[in-house]
Amino acid sequence: MSDRTRSKHDETHWFDLFDRRLTRRDFVRVGASAAALVGLGSTTGCSARAVRFTRDPFGLGVASGDPSPDGIVLWARLGADALLEAGASERAAPVGWELAADDGFRDIVRSGRTEARPELGHSVHLELEGLDPAREYFYRFHAGDAVSPVGRTKTAPLRADTPDRFDFAFASCQHYEQGHYTALRHLSEESIDAVVHLGDYIYETAAVDGRPRHHGAPETYTLDDYRRRYTLYRSDPDLQAAHHAAPWIVTTDDHEVDNDYAGASADDDQSPEALLLRRAAAYQAFYEFLPLRRSSMPSGPDMRIYRRLDFGALLGMYVLDTRQHRSDQPCGADFSPTCDEHLDPARGLLGDAQRRWLFDGLKDSSTRWNVLAQQVLMARFRTYDDAGAEVYSMDKWDGYPAERRRVLEALGAPGVRNPVVITGDLHSNWVSRLHEDFSDERSRVIATEFAGTSLTSGGNGLEQHPIGARALPHNFHFDFYNSQRGYVVVSVTPDRWTSTYRRVSTVEAPGGAVDTLGTFVVEDGRPGAVPG
Ligand code: FE
Ligand code: CA
């Protein structure tokens, strides 16, 4: 394509993509956008041809994620049905975007265009740079004549600044069939700077009758299967509302791929080769549907999802991946007595590279608070089986005690101020003191763990499940337990960390109300939570 035809082509698209003609004054006002246009033109090469949509291509909503002090990822995905109807399933489609200071888009600060490519399921992951720190923005996309919903997002504070506060919510485990996303609707109405999702964003399992919702699909194995599963989940208006409300920071647990997988080992009889192919399909779909940076784009079965985000000098967040690099669960079953393999110091959840990265980061830490955002319960959970034998859930940190000891040592080093662990996976709320020695109540408390319940998984749940209630007397380090549905809102200030456990009255029917179960505070320099 010659330069001359390309520039003519671009101009056509410019008018095609936006529902208003840009005047000269607009170009002056948006300033950087003209430069952004030129820049994007050169990175996308030969421009995609316009697509005429006959149905809304933005049915999955929009999202943003991984805030930095000067940037953010903006995400959109053109709907497969809309592309099919427009005869554009197999080619790149142009997508325009706008970033504004206000949700009415009167003050547009940046705009440009990019393209949605079939290789990534027509998703867009736009990594903006050069934005203002700790600032709220609004964004939307255009494709053909269609305009997307509006998302709100926020950049992180400057690394050298200590903001007065940083507020976020964390959540996990949103099985579609087991409940309505009422908790996410309430979460979308909280006043927060970010959402941290700790995994089980989808469940790979086949449909089961008699649940609050039904999707009718078999278990997911191929890229097509996973894409359809995410499309189903992302069609939910409550999940969309939560994405539209704030930037998300996501990681995976097991159900994004397969229940309880460990590295290349499946929980059932799939071969490692089959599981790695499945992992490649699952990770690609995860990347395609979530607002991740290019650095997290998978390559075959490998995806770099562990990463660090800083929120000024106030909070350093280490987002972990305890599935992809872990050793297989020891001793054969979930709740099992110990065995030789269990105590092998070479086994772990993190893998050598991630553990080195984490320990190096903690060694250089200068933030007031240091949080590990991760999947499985770190506190010891000692219980007894019906025969009276002491047993542990080997899928959790309890299955990897040697590595847990090393992590707690790293968190307990003198340079690491205020370590906190936030946890998903176990579909119940737990507040714990992480002791140097879980069998000695007088041993040093190193960190505080806040485990958050599921958004829907398990249905409404109980105030206390019998398995949890039975363990309480055998674990002195638990300060709170509940197993109903909800999420946790965290407010971090230089002096204190406050976790507010929010509960929804029902997820098995629509329209549940939200209330507060409890508030727990960690004071600067004093690990272990006290009631707030
Ligand atoms: Fe789960
Ligand atoms: Ca899980």
Image: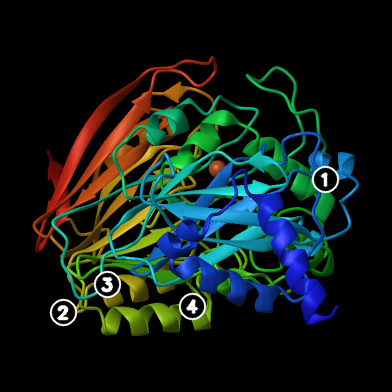
The location of residue 105, given as percent across then percent down, is 44, 44
Callout in the foreground (1, 4): 1
Q: Which residue is mark 1?
A: 83
Along the line of sight, which residue is nearer the eye, 240 or 320? 240
The residue that appears at 60% across and 75% down in the rendered structure is 38
Which image quarter holds the N terminus?
Answer: bottom right
Q: CA distance from mark 2 to mark 4?
A: 21 Å
Callout in the foreground (1, 2): 1
Give neighbour class at mark 1: few <14, some 14-19, many 20+ (Cα, 10 Å): many
Along the line of sight, which residue is nearer the eye, 112 or 277? 112
The residue that appears at 29% across and 53% down in the rendered structure is 449
Give neighbour class at mark 3: few <14, some 14-19, many 20+ (Cα, 10 Å): many
Q: Answer yes or no: is residue 376 visible.
A: no
The location of residue 378, given as percent across then percent down, is 38, 57
- Amino acid type at circle 3 is Leu
Along the line of sight, which residue is nearer the eye, 280 or 93? 93
Q: CA distance from mark 1 to mark 2?
A: 56 Å
Q: Which residue is mark 4?
A: 354
Q: Which of disc 3 and disc 1 is earlier in sequence?
A: 1
Where 368 sits versus 479, above or below?
Answer: below
Q: Which residue is mark 3?
A: 411
Q: Answer yes or no: is residue 405 visible.
A: yes
- Amino acid type at circle 1 is Leu
Q: Which of disc 4 and disc 3 is earlier in sequence?
A: 4
Q: Using residue 456 as the reference point, say whether residue 379 is left or right of it.
A: left
Visual colour scheme: rainbow
Q: CA distance from mark 1 to mark 3?
A: 49 Å
Label 2 SS? loop
- Amino acid type at circle 2 is Pro
Along the line of sight, which residue is nearer the eye, 475 or 299? 299
Q: Which residue is mark 2?
A: 414
Q: Quadrant of residue 186?
A: top left
